[in-house]
């Protein structure tokens, strides 16, 4: 039986438009921040001060940056803003999951989720408004790509979560409610790689948010030519949305497979820089009743992944309105997991989180629409 949202939306603040033309300092690389401030006539060392206040203390008000001279603070406020995406709604699941619908300067929206555990939390961050992929089991895939998100909009999602949990300044202790980032929200991160990479470098900077690269996971549906670049440039954990063991089935579930089939995808994973048994690649596998959940599928999954430093994340299908699939039964999921585990691969079954607010894996979507003829990533789009 489908699990549909039961919690009412909490309207935090209505959208009133964004007419402020001042540029946002969030999302600039260290070098770009220094350049922008220098062009405004400010001393080079101010960049380090501003960076620390934005990303360590989480401040948005220049007047509170106490180690900067008052006249300089006034000058900064005259020229720039430190801005988060605007919260349109916040929902809280009965299991503690939080989901934010965020609106950006142009009025487009994306969703961000935090999945808390007892001593940590993973923030699921979006890389695009909508998605260019049409994975048939994914709610986001029913929303055409509107546009890529900027570095400010990507890192800003994590900053909104930090605001919600009052985790500023950056904690120095080991226990954090927001300890991990997973690039598994709306969109395909490797189709917006430059912006994603800039945002994640900001997140990893030791003078700011300071998340270790070991606490960041980037998930891809299989953009094969870009996989090596993720390892070379970011060296973060890699997750791959596999979901099938044959090209015939994966062509339907994950249509990018028609361009880069399973054999090419696994070859790219085998060559992923830094992949080893201590840093295994995660293969995500949504359990779909009668589609990909047979004993034979489980044995073939073992055969395909045994040569790789791999682990499997078995994901009970999370329903959404109009979904064409059903979740495999509990007995079937656990039998599948047993076969994979007995084959020598770790295959935990993910506990669904946030289903009651459509915040679980594969359930994210916003109402943003692409304008006719609007360009996405430099390419003029087809009409919606």
Image (cartoon, rainbow, N blue to C red):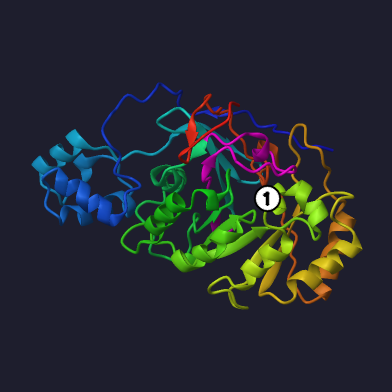
The residue lying at 75 percent from left, 55 percent from top is: 243
Which quadrant of the structure image shows residue 146? top right
Q: Nearer the viewer, residue 146 or 175?
A: 146
User: Does residue 120 belong to the magenta stretch?
Assistant: yes
Is residue 342 in sight in this rendering? yes
Residue tagged by mark 1?
A: 256
Query: Image height check: is 88 above or below 93?
Result: above
The dominant secondary structure in magenta is loop
Is residue 117 in sight in this rendering? no
The residue lying at 22 percent from left, 43 percent from top is: 64
Could you classify mark 1 by the number of other residues whose Cα lies within 10 Å: few (under 14), some (14-19), or many (20 or more)?
some
Q: Nearer the viewer, residue 117 or 29?
A: 29
Query: Image height check: is 362 above or below 122?
Result: above
From which residue to which does the magenta span run?
A: 118-146
Query: Image height check: is 115 above or below 24?
Result: below
The residue lying at 68 percent from left, 50 percent from top is: 256
Left or right: 295 as drawn, with respect to 147: right
Q: Quadrant of the C terminus?
A: top right
Percent x, y of residue 125: 53, 48
Q: Nearer the viewer, residue 193 or 21?
A: 193
User: Does residue 70 belong to the magenta stretch?
Assistant: no
Percent x, y of residue 360: 67, 45
Label 1's element?
Answer: helix
Q: Quadrant of the N terminus?
A: top right
Which quadrant of the structure image shows residue 98? top right
Percent x, y of residue 165: 46, 47
């Amino acid at each position: 039986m489908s699990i549909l949202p039961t919690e009412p939306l909490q309207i935090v603040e209505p959208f009133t438009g964004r007419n402020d033309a001042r540029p946002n300092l969030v999302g600039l690389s260290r070098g770009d921040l220094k350049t922008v401030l220098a062009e405004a006539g400010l001393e080079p060392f101010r960049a380090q001060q501003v960076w620390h206040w934005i990303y360590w203390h989480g401040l948005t008000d220049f007047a509170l940056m106490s180690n900067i001279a008052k006249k300089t603070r006034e000058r900064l406020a005259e020229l720039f803003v430190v801005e988060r995406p605007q919260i349109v709604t916040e929902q809280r699941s009965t299991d503690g999951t939080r989901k934010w619908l965020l609106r950006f300067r142009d009025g487009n929206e994306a969703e961000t989720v935090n999945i808390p555990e007892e001593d940590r939390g993973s923030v699921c961050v979006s890389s695009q408004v909508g998605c260019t992929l049409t994975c048939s089991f994914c709610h986001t895939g029913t929303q055409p790509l509107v546009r890529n998100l900027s570095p400010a909009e990507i890192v800003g999602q994590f900053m909104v979560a930090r605001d919600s949990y009052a985790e500023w300044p950056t904690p120095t202790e080991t226990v954090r409610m927001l300890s991990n980032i997973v690039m598994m929200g709306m969109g395909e991160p490797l189709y917006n790689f430059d912006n994603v990479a800039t945002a994640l470098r900001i997140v990893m900077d030791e003078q700011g948010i300071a998340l270790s690269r070991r606490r960041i996971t980037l998930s891809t549906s299989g953009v094969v030519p870009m996989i090596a670049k993720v390892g070379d440039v970011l060296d973060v954990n890699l997750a791959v949305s596999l979901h099938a063991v044959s090209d015939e089935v994966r062509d339907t579930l994950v249509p990018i497979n028609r361009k880069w089939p399973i054999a090419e995808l696994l070859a790219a994973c085998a060559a992923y820089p830094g992949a080893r048994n201590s840093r295994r690649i995660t293969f995500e596998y949504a359990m779909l009743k009668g589609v990909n959940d047979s004993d034979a599928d489980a044995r073939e999954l073992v055969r395909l992944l045994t040569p790789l430093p791999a682990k499997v994340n078995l994901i009970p299908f999370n329903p959404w309105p109009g979904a064409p699939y059903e979740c495999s039964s509990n007995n079937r999921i656990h039998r599948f997991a047993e076969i994979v585990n007995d084959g020598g691969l770790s295959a935990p079954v993910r506990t669904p989180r946030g289903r009651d607010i459509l915040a679980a894996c594969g359930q994210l979507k916003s109402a943003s629409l692409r304008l006719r003829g609007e360009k996405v990533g430099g390419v003029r789009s087809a009409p919606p």
